[in-house]
Image: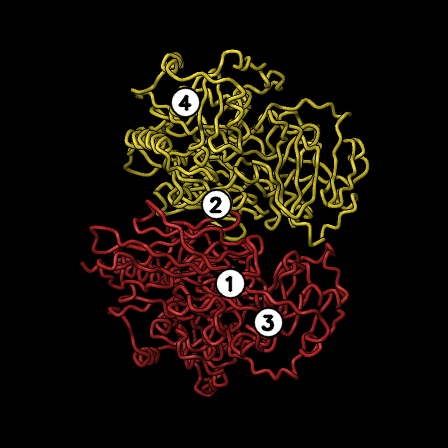
Chain colours: A yellow, B red
Amino acid sequence: MFGRTTTRGFKQNHFYRRFHARYQEESRGKHNYYKYAYIAGASTAGLLSFQTIKTVKLDHAKTDEKLLNDSKKFPLYNQDEVKKHGKSAERIWVTYKDGVYDVTDFISMHPGGDKILLAAGAAVDPFWALYSQHKTDEVLEILEGYRIGRLDVKDVPKAEPDAFSNDPERHPALIVRNAKPFNAESPPSLIGDHFFTPNELFFVRNHLPVPDIKTEDHRLTIETRNGKTIDLSVEELKKGYKSYTIGSVIQCAGNRRADMHQYKKVQGLMWEGTAISNAEWTGVRLRDLLKKAGIDVFDENIKHVHFEGADIDPTGTPYGASIPIEKARGDEVIVAYHMNGVDIPRDHGAPLRVIVPGNVGARQVKWLRKIIVSEKESDSHWQQKDYRAFSPAVNHGDELNWQSVPSIQEYPVQCAICTPAPNIEVDRDDGTVTISGYAWSGGGRGIIRIEISVDEGKTWQSCELQQDEKQDVEHMYSWTLFTAEVPIPADVKKFNIIAKAVDRAYNTQPETASGIWNIRGLIHNAWHRVPVMVKD
Amino acid sequence: MFGRTTTRGFKQNHFYRRFHARYQEESRGKHNYYKYAYIAGASTAGLLSFQTIKTVKLDHAKTDEKLLNDSKKFPLYNQDEVKKHGKSAERIWVTYKDGVYDVTDFISMHPGGDKILLAAGAAVDPFWALYSQHKTDEVLEILEGYRIGRLDVKDVPKAEPDAFSNDPERHPALIVRNAKPFNAESPPSLIGDHFFTPNELFFVRNHLPVPDIKTEDHRLTIETRNGKTIDLSVEELKKGYKSYTIGSVIQCAGNRRADMHQYKKVQGLMWEGTAISNAEWTGVRLRDLLKKAGIDVFDENIKHVHFEGADIDPTGTPYGASIPIEKARGDEVIVAYHMNGVDIPRDHGAPLRVIVPGNVGARQVKWLRKIIVSEKESDSHWQQKDYRAFSPAVNHGDELNWQSVPSIQEYPVQCAICTPAPNIEVDRDDGTVTISGYAWSGGGRGIIRIEISVDEGKTWQSCELQQDEKQDVEHMYSWTLFTAEVPIPADVKKFNIIAKAVDRAYNTQPETASGIWNIRGLIHNAWHRVPVMVKD
C-alpha cells in the first residue's frame, strides 16, 4: 500500500538501519546489554510506537529543546491542511505538539501495525497520553526524522488530563515495568509460596486505563448472529447459571521477552520471567450463556466467539479479542466473577472477566461487557495486528505481513526458575543449591516432567512437582510449581542452572532463542538459564 | 519387586555396565557410529528383548557353538523343575533351546517391561520365533550370563514353523528395518512426489505376523460398560453409517530413533526419518458407532476407549491400545475401511483400522475387531509398558518405573528433510541446493511455518509449504510438505542444512537431543540436520 521507494522513504529507512546497525555493533558479544541499551517504546499494543533504542553512549542524541530549535526552519501548517493528509490520502501526516510529520514511509515498519492510521491527518498527542512509553528522547528523535513542518500554535492540543489518575492502588511488591498503562510482574521470590497467586501479587497487564465499573450497573450483552441480544446483570449471571471453579494460569505473550532480547534485540515491554500467575476462578460456563442466548454451539457457521472489554482507547474502540468456537464451547471456558474466592479486583477485570484456560492472556478479556458469535475472528487490533509471532526470517525494518502468521491462542510449554535470582553467589561448602520455579503449557496439556541441568544439558536431574489436586494430566490449566536440590559442580567459578519442562503431548522447549526469535519478542520459551557464582 | 542386590545380580549388572562403557568409549566423538555399532535387539514391543549392542570389534564375542560347549558343566533340569520357577516364584527361570536361565535379576532392566514374565517357568522359544531380532550373538551372550543349567533333551521345544510365512508381498522400494515382524520405511526420495503416500510406499510398522482376514467373515464388536455388545460386518458398517474422509498422518513413536542414537545410545528399531506417511482414510465416525451401541459419550464414568486388533501374540493376547474419551468422541476419529480410496491393504489393517488423527501410530489399531469403553486405560503391554518416553535422567540399567510417565498420545511438532540425502556432494557453481521434506504436529495443530538454516541457526529462511486443501490450521491432520532453495554458504567445505517447524500452538522443536534423549529413543524431534559436502 505504501511503497518505500521515495527519496524520503529511503533516507529514513537508511537512518533507521544505520541506527540499528550501530546498536548491534555496540551490543555484540556483550552479556550486559542492559548497561547500554533497552527498548523504551513499542508496547505490545503500541499506538504510533516508533521502534526505539536508548543507548547511554548515543552521541547523536538530541534533547527535546534542540529539536525544537532545529524545527524553526520548517514551514507552518494549520490543522485543516494537516487534515487533508488523512488515512485515504497519498501522503499520511500526523502532528505531535507543534510538529507536523509525514509518516507515510514509516507505516509499514510500525510495530503496532496500521493502527498508526487512527491518528492520520490529526494529532498523536491523545494516543501518546495513553502510551507514555512514546515520550522518550529516542522516539522523538525518530519522529523528527519525518518532520515536514510546524503546526500553527492555535491548533496545538492542550495537555490532556492524566487518563490513569483513577487507576487502583497496587501492592508495592509488584515489579512495575510500565506505569501508564500499568504493567507489573509478580515478585519471583514469592512465586513458590503460593500455588494460587494472591490477587494483590498477581501480575498485571493493562493496555489502557482501568475502567471503574459499579457492579450493580454493569451489563453483559450477548449478540447472536441474527442480531438478537440478551443482556444480564452480574447478579442475574450469578443466580441464573451453574457456577464452576477452575485453577487457571494467565500468562502474557511477552513473558520472558527480556531474556529473548539478550539473544537479539526485540521490541516491547521488557518483561522478565513472571508475567504469569495462577488463580482459582469462579464463574459460569460460556457455553451455558451461549445456549441461553439461543445459540447452537455446533452451528457450522459459527467459527469464533468475540469478547469486548469496557477499556476504551481514545478513538472509542474497546479492547477486543476472539477465540475459536471449539474452545469456546469447551467445559473449561467461563465468565468469571470471583478470583481466588473474592470479587475480581479492578486491575483483573472487575466485575467480569472471560477465563480461557490454556490460552494466552490477551484473549482473556477483562471488564467483559459484550460477547458476539461470528464466522470470523475479531477485527480488533490486538487480534489482527498484535500478539502474532513472526518468523526469525523477518527482521527489524522489514514490512510486516500480519496475515502471514496466526493469532496466538494456545501457549506452548513454558518453564522458568524463580529462585535463586541470577548472579547470586553460593558457598561451595553448602554443596547444593535449592531451585524453585514454575512450568505450564497451553491447551490443558499437563506438565509431565521438569528437569534441571548444571552442566549445560549434558546430564539432567528430575524435580519435585506440585500440581493442582483437582486437575489431571489431560486437563491441567493450573501451573506446576517445582523444586530441586542441585549439586554445585566441581572446579567452576560460575555455572548456569538450566530448567526445562515436558508437556502431555511430549512438547519440549528449544535450547536457545535461535529458532524462535521474533521481532516482537513474543512467546519466549527457550530453556531458562540462571547464572550462579561459586565462592570457594 | 526383584532386588538387584544378590551377587549374581551384581555381577550381571557389572558386566552390562562395562559393556556399555566400552561402547561409549568407542563411539565418543565419532559421527560414524554406524560403522562400529548398532542395536540389534530390543524392538519397541520386544518380548524378552535383551538390551544388546553389536560391535564389529567385539573381542569377547562368542559363537553359539562355544556357548554350547561351555554349558556342559551346568546341571541338568527337566520341564517340571523349570515350571516351579514361574512368575510367582522367588526366582524366575526360563529356557531357550537346551539352556536353563535364572533371569530374576534381569527383569527390572528388560526394555519390554515385565512382559518377560509371560515366559516364566517355560520356554522363550515361541516368543523369539516372533521376534527374530533376539537371535543374535550378543543376545545369546547376555542370556548365557544368566545360565544355571541344561534342559533335558526330551523337553527342548521343536523348531516352530515360520509364523510370518503368510505375510503379504511388499513393494521393493520400502526400506526394510526388520523383516519379521515386518517394519519398513517409506523411501525418503519419493516423499515429495506424493502429498498422500501411495499405499504400497506407506511405511509399515507391524508388531506381529499379519492376520489374513476374509472381509466377509470379519466382525467388529463394540462392548458397552454394561457388558452389552453389538457386532457389525464390514458391509453393515459401510451401509449403516455416514462415511467421512480425512487426510491423516501415521507416525511411529520411534521415527528418527537412529538420529537420537547418534546423540547417545538408545534401544529399539533403528528408524531413520520416514517411519511416517500420510493418507486419506475413509470410514465411519467412532462416535456414531458408540452412540449406536447405546453409549453416552459424555457419560462421566467413561474415560477411555480401547481397541483390539486381530494380531495375536504367542500367549493369545491381541495387540491393544486405548485413547481418552475426549479424543474418541471428536469429529476426526474414524473406523476406516478405505486407504486412499481403496480397501485398506493387509499390511495396514485390512479390513478395518481405527484412525486417530493427531495421535501416535501405536493407538491407531490395525485389523480392528473390538472396541470397549472403560474407566481405565488399556491394560495392554503396548499401552502400559511401551510407547512411554522416560526422562533423560533415566539411564540404561536403571529400574524402569513405567507409571512415572504417561502413555504417548498426541505427538509433538516434527520436521525432517527428505532430500538431499546426508553427505551428498554439491557443486559450488550451482549456487544453491534444493531442499524438500515434511513437518507435522499432533492434536490437529497445523504447521504455521518451516524454516531452514545453513549457518547452524544464526539466520533462517522460510520455506514454501504444501498443505491439505480440505484442512485449516486448527484442524490439520495431514502433514505439510515443504521445499526451499538455499544458498551454498561461502568458504566452507561442509555444512549442515537444518530444518525446523512451528505448530499452531507455537510449539517448536529442540535444537538437539540433549533435553529429550530417552533410553527407548522415542519421539525424537530435534532439529533435523543434513550434512552436505561442497566441491569447489
Res A498 → quadrant: top left
| Lower position in the chain sequence, tag 4 or tag 2 | 4
Q: Nearer the viewer, mark 4 or mark 2?
A: 4
Disc 4 packing (10 Å; few <14; some 14–19; many ≥20): some
- The answer to whether B4 appears left or right of B28 in the picture is right
Q: Are marks 4 and 3 in contact (CB under 8 Å)?
A: no
**In the rendered image, is residue A534 in sight?**
no
Which of labels 3 and 1 is toward the front?
Answer: 3
Q: What is the secondary structure assignment of the residue under circle 4? A: strand
Task: Report the residue at 50% width, 52% height from top.
Answer: A506
| Foreground label between 2 and 1 | 2
Query: Mark 4 sits on what residue?
Result: A147
In this view of the protein, can residue A398 be seen by the observer?
yes
Q: Which residue is mark 3?
A: B353
Disc 2 from disc 3: Cα separation: 34 Å
- On screen, B181 above or below A318? below
Tell me if label 1 and label 4 are in contact, CB under 8 Å: no
Left or right, B174 with reference to A473: left
Residue A398 at x, y percent in the picture? 40, 39
Q: What kind of residue is marked 3?
A: Arg
- Residue drawn at x 23%, y 56% is B494
Q: Position of residue B536 (x, y in %)?
A: 18, 58
The residue that disc 1 covers is B386
Compare residues A484 and B349 and report the one nearer the observer: B349
Q: Which residue is mark 2?
A: A501
Label 1 near label 2: C-beta < 8 Å? no
Q: Nearer the viewer, mark 2 or mark 3?
A: 3
Residue B503: % across, % down? 49, 51
Task: Say whether residue B244 is left or right of residue B161.
Answer: right
Tell which subunit mark 3 falls on: B
How much space separates mark 3 and mark 1, taking CA atoms?
21 Å
